[in-house]
Each structure stands twice: as C-alpha cells, then as structure tokens.
C-alpha cells in the first residue's frame, strides 16, 4: 500500500493504482475524457492534468501516473483550471456544433466538461471538420466530425473485444480514427465502441432520434439470451424497450455486451407477439378468453393422464421461480415426463460432470478466467456461443499473457488471439484428442492422481489413444497435443471451457466426461484460481438443471416423449418457451410426433412453427416483463426485473402456471417472487443460503467463487465418431444469434437474416461457387437449398450451417450426431 496526500487529504491505496484512481477513491473529482476503468491507461486528452509537488510543479496526466509514497498532489489549482480550459478550447476548434440534432445530447462528456470548465468562448479559430458520415452498416453510425480522438473505441475493440476494427490514421490536424483502408465499418457489431465513445461520434442507429436520455426509464435486468448472465440496463420509453443503456457499475460483465445483448432486445416489441390465447376450433386457431383456454388445457392434460399420459417440454429461458411453478404443475398433473432443451444437450453437465466431479455445474466464476495462465477452449466457436466470456479470454491473453489452446473442428475468433494454438481436429474426433491429452499426463507421470478414483481403469481404457495414434486419425499435430497437456498441468491457474446447447447434442456427455477427466488429472476442479466451465446456450440453462427440470423418477425425457407420441403412447404434450420443430435435431421426427400426439399445448411469445400445430396456444411474457431470478453458467443467481408491460393479454409463464394449477385443483400463488424463491431453497439446498433480498447488483454465487467438488473420479468417455463422404457437416451457433428467438430481433437480423452453408475457399474453388450462390446440401435422406458463405476458418471438406432459422429447416439434415456426411451439388 502507498500513502499520499491529495488536495490536503490523506489517502492510502494499492501501489498499482494511478493518481486518478486514488483521487476517485478519496472522493475527489478529476475531469476525464479518455479514461475508462476497464481500459489500460492512455493519457490522450490531457483534461485530467494535476500537479505533483515533488515534480517541481510540472502538470502531469493523473490517469497514467502511478501513485508514489509521500506524493503531494494538487488537482484543482487556478493554473490547472486554466490549462484544462485551454485543452477544451483546442478540442472545440474543429468540433462541429450540432448538439441539437446529436443523439448524445444530455449525456455527452464534452458538453459536460465544457460547462464544468466554463469554456463558453474560444480564443482559437479553425475550420470545422466536414467528413462523410459512415452509415454503411445497419447498427452503428460513425460521424468523425464529432470525434475528439480519445482513442477509447480503438482500445476497447483491441483490449476487450480483440477484433481491432479501428485505428488512428494520418498525422497532426489530419489525424482521425478510421477502419482498415478507411472503408465503412464491417465488424461483429458488439457495440462496445458505442459504450465507450464520450461524444456523438459513434451512435446506435436503431435508437437514433427515438428519445433523449433523460426521457428513458432505466431498469437493470439480465440478458435473455445465453448463459453468460450479462447485466443489461433496459432503456424504456412508454411501453417499449427502446435501447440498452451502458452500465459498468453493476453486474459481472463490466458493461461488456455482444451484438445480441446490445442490439437483440427488439423482439420484445415485435408486432408478431402473441397477445391473446388461441384455441383450435373447426381446424383453425381462434382467439378466446384465458378462462376458456386454461380450462381446455386442464381438461386435455387431465384426460391424457388418465390415458397414455402427458409430457412437459420446456425451454431454458424461464426464471427459477417459473421453473419451480412448472414443476408444481407437473406434480399436480401427476406426470414425471418433464424435460427441457431437447433432453440431450445438457447431459454433459447432469451426467458428465456429475459422474466425475460430483456436481452438475461449473466450478469457478468468470472473473477468475482473466487471471488464468493457461486457457483451453473446447469447440472453436465458443466465442460465437458466449461472446462476453470470449472477451474475458481475450483479456487473459493480452493482459495476463495466458497461453490459449483451442480444440475444435474449425478455426474461429479465439484462434486469432496472440499466441493462440489450435488443435484442429477432424469433426467428431475432439473426444479422442481429449483422451490422448489425458494419456500424456498419465504416461509421463504428470497427472495429479491423489484421491482420484478410477485411474488404473482409465489407463487401461486409453491404450489405443496414444498421441501418435490420435494425431494420425484426427489430424491434430502430435507435438502440439503433447505440449497442450503439459502446459495445462503445469499452470498455476488454468481454465477449461466448453459450451453446450441444442445444436451441440452429439457426444456432449462424452466430451464433458473426457474434459472433466483431463481437468481432474491436471488438478483444476476445486483449486482456487482455476476452473472447469460448462456454459449453457440459454439464459437460465443452469437454473433449469439446479431446479431439476428433468425427467422425474421413471419419467420420459424429451426424445423419449417424442418417440412415445409417434408410437401412440403419449396423449398430450405441453411445450413451454420452446420451438422443437425449428430447433430440435431431426425435424421430420419431431414433426411426426407433434402430428401424432392427440393434444398439444404451446406457450410462447410468438406463433412459432410448433405453435401452429397446437390445439391451444398461450401468450407468454418475455424476460423484459418478468420479475424473478436467472442462474448463469458460473452459478451466479441474479435478479430479472420487469421493464415493460406484456402486450395485450399475455402473461408471465409463472402466472400461467399458477392459473393452470388452479384449474387442475391445486393452489399456487405467483404474485411474490421472493416467497417462491424461499420455497426453492427448501428443495434446492444450494439456494437455501440466500434470501431474495440478498441478491444485489453483483448477484450471489451458490457454492462460493470456487466450488468445492464432491467427487474425484475419472471415467472412460469412449471414442469419437466420424463419417466418410465428400463433405462433413457440423452445426452450431452463429455469432449474431442465440436459439431461434433472436431471428425476431431487428438488430441481429439486420446483420444476418438467413441461413447459409459455410465452406472453405478451396472447396468453393473446386465447386465453382461464390458467396450468395445457391447449392443443394444432401444428407440423412434430406436435400436442402442453402446460400453459400465462403470463409477462411473451415478445413477442406468441412461445412458449417447455423441452426437458428426455422425456414431453412437445417435441423432436417442432422439427427443429433456430432457430424453428418453430406454431398454438395451446385
């Protein structure tokens, strides 16, 4: 710690702090323009100049100057004020004065500083900037006439996002911030630059001219997309969410958001939202009252239970309190047929992790990744599934010099980070690579086997997984495979990450088991500063597992329910917040099940492909209309708060469950989330340590920052699976979308509005196709027409198709396999 004096006030602070941070800690205001707490010190604007007595009165930038023992600092003398005012005058010489039409008005740092420093006139004259406005992309407007060259957009894109869209070009008065070759902005559109820009040089186009900041009501909630659990602040005007506000003061994401979190909110305002219950009469879905709709549902489900039984399928975007209420409905109905998210994708957690480390959850929190010495990301599209975790990985690499290892069947964003090493495997054989890495540790005596069960059995099972054998069949470099295993076990702090979700069902349990084996042998689970992370696709994937939205007793899982429906052995399906026809693997089988089941109820935001087949459709609320909690992939329980009313007569899922329970003869109150959260604690011990009121801005983490694991057992996970054929197709998530609901949001669809099949440049040349060409992709007895996307990340012979777009029916091509053999016809 260091002791210093600032404006006569004694301050004690860490020796790594800057003068600006020390002053802020002491409650002393120093104006800044280029400073941001999550960026490295830069010192571009010179607004934060202060005087240090020991430096003979020289003015220095407080944001870049480290504190020193005994320093005497003056922050607000007359000379300092005069210099700051002069700096402002220089900034305003060329700055256009279009404040009345600039959307930044009311929250512009330049406006505020001009007022604060009294820069009401200017002693200097110069020509105002007259640069063209960049409106090429649909989400971010760039008006460099308003730029003050603080460099925050350049730095956040490099330091946090790792994309590097911006740079300074030219010299002197001609200096400006531009993209490569000074073209229009074409990036991943996360909008991090928007959140950093202190003026109106960068603005969100979807929000342009919608409102002034003081007109907005701000509501802190949690993003409704992936399992990262980012805090979002809803900017509400009237009954609509008009924007997502920047807020780095609460939450665990430090204000960082991806394209979905920042621009994917508009589906909650969509005109296609369901507003009234629908009941099928004479073959048509017609509007009806809630009382009639719920009675039809109750009668239909009760009748089914007296026959072949009813099943309940849920999505993973309900709140914890709603999951509790859903289980209450299942108990009242008397069915054990309960499941979520297709029934397979989460088994890596519920069976893979549970069977090895004894807990069905990640073992550490996301901030610990940033301090890791070695990071292993399994599946190269981890950044696409969980972009903000990808940003944390980027910071670990750039600020902590972490060694990044990426295991996947294609290259991605993470592979481009400094020093990243890619274990590029044939699709479906990543499992073999993990087995070989475990064998390296065992054979070389590096494995930490004390207290670990099943080691000898695993050694025997891994006889055919030597690095040389696996390298030959997977295509991974043998030296890199061995080096990766050694680096992992040798790291003081290490992190292993893997994503799971609906398009990643093939070998999910096996991959997670092999990952847990490797983690155990490297001594990672339960060790402070290290962690094993399995991150769910949906906002409350972990909550669904914690609350046990799984087959009960001898009940059927999702795929078994669909199979029973096809065989005439299930009389009703109640589907909540899920569109199986669009998102489950093997669409044809799912369609047959929905056609065969005698009674189908769908509860959703939109009249989805699945809802169109239903006998009753119930209009539900979005995350922006709910009160309750989500649990993210690091076990962090966070508050979800309502910002807008539901459209028409739509209700929250919890309110619907309560009303349905009443129709079924049971009493369930869903008016106070706090009381339901207390009831959850009685059934889920991990939640019992918290009360609803304790869940503050940072949330609460059940099990602590580092989860102490209940088991240490390695289990042979089996071998990978691959296919022969002209091309190997893998499916997954595209960066701009999450599930199917994002296809209803204007932001993500403005960037990517249709399905595609991605292939390498080498394959494109051989097929004589270019971007946008239509090709036929045939496999699994199905032939689809898809647009071509040519890129650099795929190996020859490997294809990728995202699964989000219902109209494309990509889920007809895969039936849950890790990889599908297909043909491509021009």
Image: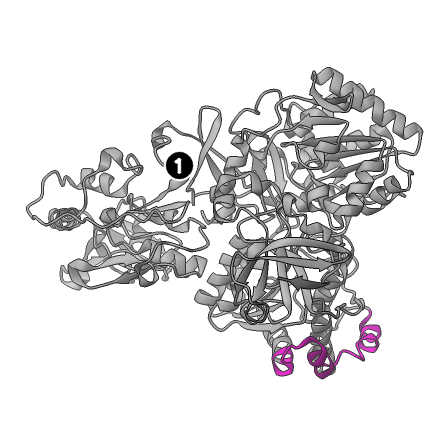
Residue on which disc 1 sits: 207
Which residue, as the protein is rendered here, is positioned at the far left?
Answer: 123
* 45 over 277 or under it: above or below: below
Q: Does any portion of residue 668 appear in the rendered image?
A: no
For numbered disc 1, what is the local secondary structure? helix
Q: Nearer the viewer, residue 671 or 585?
A: 585
Q: Which residues are magenta?
A: 454-482
Disc 1: CA contacts within 10 A as few (<14), some (14-19) or many (>=20): some
Residue in the image at 12% along x and 38% along y: 120
- What secondary structure characterizes most of the magenta part? helix
Q: Quadrant of residue 328?
A: top right
Horizontal side of residue 410 vs 304, given as left or right:
left
Residue 361 % position (x, y): 69, 53
Figure label count: 1
Q: Is residue 459 magenta?
A: yes
Q: Quadrant of residue 442?
A: bottom right
Residue 770 is situated, as x and y percent measured from the top left of the image, at 52, 62
Q: Is residue 509 magenta?
A: no
Is residue 537 visible from the viewing direction of this image?
yes
x%, y% of residue 473?
72, 78
The x and y percentages for residue 603 are: 70, 31
Residue 767: quarter of image: bottom right
């Amino acid at each position: 710690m260091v002791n210093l004096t600032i404006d006569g006030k004694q301050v004690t602070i860490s020796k790594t702090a800057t003068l600006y941070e020390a002053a802020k800690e002491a409650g002393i205001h120093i104006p800044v323009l280029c400073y941001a707490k999550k960026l490295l010190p830069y010192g571009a604007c010179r607004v934060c100049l202060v005087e240090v007595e020991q430096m003979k009165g020289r003015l220095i930038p407080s944001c870049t100057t480290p504190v020193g023992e005994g320093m005497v600092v003056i922050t607000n003398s007359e000379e300092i004020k005069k210099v700051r005012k002069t700096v402002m005058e220089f900034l305003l010489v060329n700055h256009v004065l279009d404040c009345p039409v600039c959307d930044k008005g009311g929250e512009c740092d330049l406006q505020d500083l001009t007022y604060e420093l009294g820069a009401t006139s200017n002693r200097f004259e110069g020509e105002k900037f007259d640069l063209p406005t960049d409106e090429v992309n649909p989400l971010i407007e760039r008006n460099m006439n308003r730029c003050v060259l603080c460099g925050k957009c350049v730095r956040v894109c490099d330091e946090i996002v790792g994309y590097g869209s911006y740079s300074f070009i030219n010299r002197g008065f001609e200096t400006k911030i531009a993209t490569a070759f000074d073209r229009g902005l074409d990036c991943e559109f996360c909008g991090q630059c928007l959140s950093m820009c202190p003026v109106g040089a960068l603005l969100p186009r979807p929000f342009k001219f919608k409102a002034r900041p003081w007109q907005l009501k701000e509501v802190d909630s949690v993003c409704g997309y992936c399992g990262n659990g980012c805090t979002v602040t809803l900017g509400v005007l009237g009954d609509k969410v008009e924007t997502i506000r920047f807020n780095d003061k609460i939450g665990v994401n430090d204000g960082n958001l991806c394209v979905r979190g920042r621009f994917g909110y508009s589906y909650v305002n969509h005109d296609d939202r369901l507003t009234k219950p629908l009941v099928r009469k004479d073959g048509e879905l017609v509007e009806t009252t809630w009382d009639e709709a719920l009675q039809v549902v109750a009668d239909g489900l009760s009748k089914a239970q007296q026959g072949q039984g009813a099943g309940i399928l849920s999505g993973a975007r309900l709140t914890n309190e709603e999951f509790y209420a859903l289980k209450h409905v299942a108990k009242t109905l008397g069915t054990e047929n309960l499941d979520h998210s297709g029934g397979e994708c989460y088994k890596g957690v519920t069976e893979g992790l549970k069977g090895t480390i004894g807990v069905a959850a990640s073992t550490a929190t996301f901030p610990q990744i940033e301090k890791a010495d070695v990071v292993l990301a399994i599946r190269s599209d981890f950044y696409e599934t969980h972009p903000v975790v990808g940003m944390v990985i980027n910071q670990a690499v750039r600020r902590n010099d972490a060694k990044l290892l990426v295991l996947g069947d294609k290259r991605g964003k993470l592979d481009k980070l400094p020093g990243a090493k890619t274990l590029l495997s044939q699709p479906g054989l990543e499992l073999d690579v993990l087995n070989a890495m475990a064998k390296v540790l065992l054979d070389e005596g590096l494995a930490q086997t004390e207290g670990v069960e099943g080691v000898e059995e695993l050694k025997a099972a891994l006889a055919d997984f030597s690095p040389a054998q696996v390298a030959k069949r997977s295509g991974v470099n043998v030296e890199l495979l061995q080096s990766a295993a050694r680096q992992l076990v040798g790291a003081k702090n290490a992190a292993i990450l893997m994503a799971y979700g609906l398009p990643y069902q093939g070998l999910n349990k096996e991959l997670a088991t092999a990952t847990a084996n490797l983690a155990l042998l490297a001594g990672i689970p339960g060790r402070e500063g290290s962690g094993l992370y399995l991150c769910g696709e949906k906002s409350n994937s972990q909550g669904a597992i914690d609350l046990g939205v799984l087959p009960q007793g001898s009940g059927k899982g999702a795929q078994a329910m669909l199979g029973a429906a096809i065989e005439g052995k299930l009389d009703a399906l109640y589907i909540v917040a899920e569109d199986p026809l669009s998102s489950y693997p093997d669409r044809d089988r799912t369609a047959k099940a929905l056609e065969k089941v005698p009674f189908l109820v769908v509860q959703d935001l939109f009249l989805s492909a699945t809802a169109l087949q239903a006998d009753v459709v119930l209009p539900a609320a979005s995350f922006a209309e709910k009160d309750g909690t989500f649990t993210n992939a690091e076990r962090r329980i966070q508050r979800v708060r309502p910002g807008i009313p539901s459209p028409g007569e739509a209700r929250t899922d919890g309110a619907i469950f309560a009303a349905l329970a009443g129709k079924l003869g049971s009493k369930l109150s869903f008016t106070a989330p706090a009381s339901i959260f207390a009831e959850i604690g009685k059934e889920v011990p991990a939640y019992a340590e918290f009360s609803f009121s304790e869940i503050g801005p940072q949330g609460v983490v059940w099990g602590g920052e580092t989860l102490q694991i209940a088991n240490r057992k390695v289990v042979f996970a089996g071998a990978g699976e691959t296919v022969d054929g002209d091309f190997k197709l893998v499916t997954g998530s595209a960066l701009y979308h999450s599930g199917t609901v994002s296809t209803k949001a204007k932001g993500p669809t403005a960037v990517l509005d249709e399905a595609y099949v991605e292939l390498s440049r080498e394959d494109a040349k051989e097929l004589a196709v270019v971007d946008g060409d239509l090709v036929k992709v045939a496999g699994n007895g199905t032939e689809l027409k898809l647009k071509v996307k040519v890129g650099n990340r795929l190996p020859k012979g490997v294809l990728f198709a995202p699964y989000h777009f219902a109209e494309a029916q990509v889920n007809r091509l895969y039936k849950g396999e890790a990889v599908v053999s297909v043909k491509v016809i021009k």
